[in-house]
Amino acid sequence: MKLSEKIKNLPLVWVIIMAFGVALGGFFIGNGFYKSLAKRTVTVKGLAEMDVVADTAIWNIKFNRVGGDLVKVQAAIDNDIEKTHNFLLDNGFHEDELQNLRITVRDKYAGYSDAQRQGQDSNDRYVIETGVMVRSNEVNLVDGVSRKMGDLVRQGVTVTEDYAGPIYVFNGLNDIKIKMIEMATKNATAAGEQFAKDANAKLGKIQSANQGVFSISARDQSDAWSDNERQSINKRVRVVTTITFYLR
């Protein structure tokens, strides 16, 4: 008896069950095939780098005075502040770019008893520290004048030993973020396409993507162990994106 005749002789309920089973089997086979394809992915990284120039300079010029007469020490500090302002104004800065730093006063013998003060040199009892901060968008001017600090020292201003020079800041990161992400994405896509070609496959849609963190470093590092980004006018912005593509 032919299969078609056998099916005709079966009760309707069995025919429905068989049809459903065939359809369900086809679904699982097709779905399993789809999932096996979906599992074929490649994860690649895309790099984007851009050289930028700092747009803001912050320069703290710190100095101190030591003495036994607090009033005289303060007068010397006032004189140093005036000399520093004049030095900066004479070299092209504007008054609104200058700001006096806070004054700190330290008594080296604070807490000493009268007996403990005996024999101490009272001429260096008081230490007053302060300075002048320069905040300017003229980064090249700041860089040039900072190299002339000897002129100020020759006027008798004692620049403290923690003097580290100006720091330079780049504030335009938001203006270049989108462009750099596009560059990194194109770089990652090119790497994915090459991988797919080598694997005899084609690059599919994006499964997932991670933008990565933007980093700023000195364009020209002084050595291999440190990053002098804060002291560098010329900087390098870098971002790495991680993208997972489907392969088909």
Image: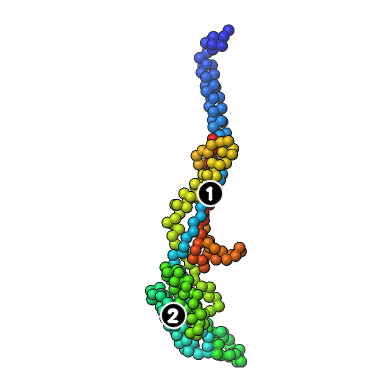
Q: Percent x, y for residue 96? A: 38, 74
Task: Determine which residue is flagged by label 2.
Answer: 87
CB atoms of marks 1 and 2 within 8 Å: no
Residue 49, visible in the rendered structure: yes
Q: Percent x, y for residue 211? A: 50, 50
Disc with the residue nearer the chain's start (1 vs 2):
1
Q: Residue at x 52, y 88 (%)?
A: 67
Q: Percent x, y for residue 4? A: 54, 11
Q: Is residue 157 above or below residue 59?
A: below
Locate the C terminus and report the quarter of the image it occupies: top right
Residue 210, visible in the rendered structure: no
Q: Residue at x 56, y 11 (%)?
A: 3
Q: Nearer the viewer, residue 8 or 113?
A: 8
Amino acid type, callout 1: Gly
Q: Residue at x 42, y 68 (%)?
A: 137
Q: Tell which residue pokes out farthest to the top in this image.
A: 1
Q: How is the image coloured?
A: rainbow
Local SS, label 2: helix
Q: Percent x, y for residue 89? A: 41, 78
Which quadrant of the structure image shows residue 222?
bottom right
Local SS, label 1: strand
Locate the N terminus and report the quarter of the image it occupies: top right
Task: Determine which residue is flagged by label 1.
Answer: 46
Q: Is residue 72 above or below residue 205?
A: below
Q: Is residue 213 above or below residue 199?
A: below
Number of the label disc, if any, that sits on residue 73: none
Q: Residue at x 46, y 63 (%)?
A: 53
| Neighbourhood count class around disc 2 (C-alpha, 10 Å): few under 14, some 14–19, many 20 upward | some
| Neighbourhood count class around disc 1 (C-alpha, 10 Å): few under 14, some 14–19, many 20 upward | many
Amino acid type, callout 2: Phe
Q: Cα distance, mark 1 to mark 2? A: 49 Å
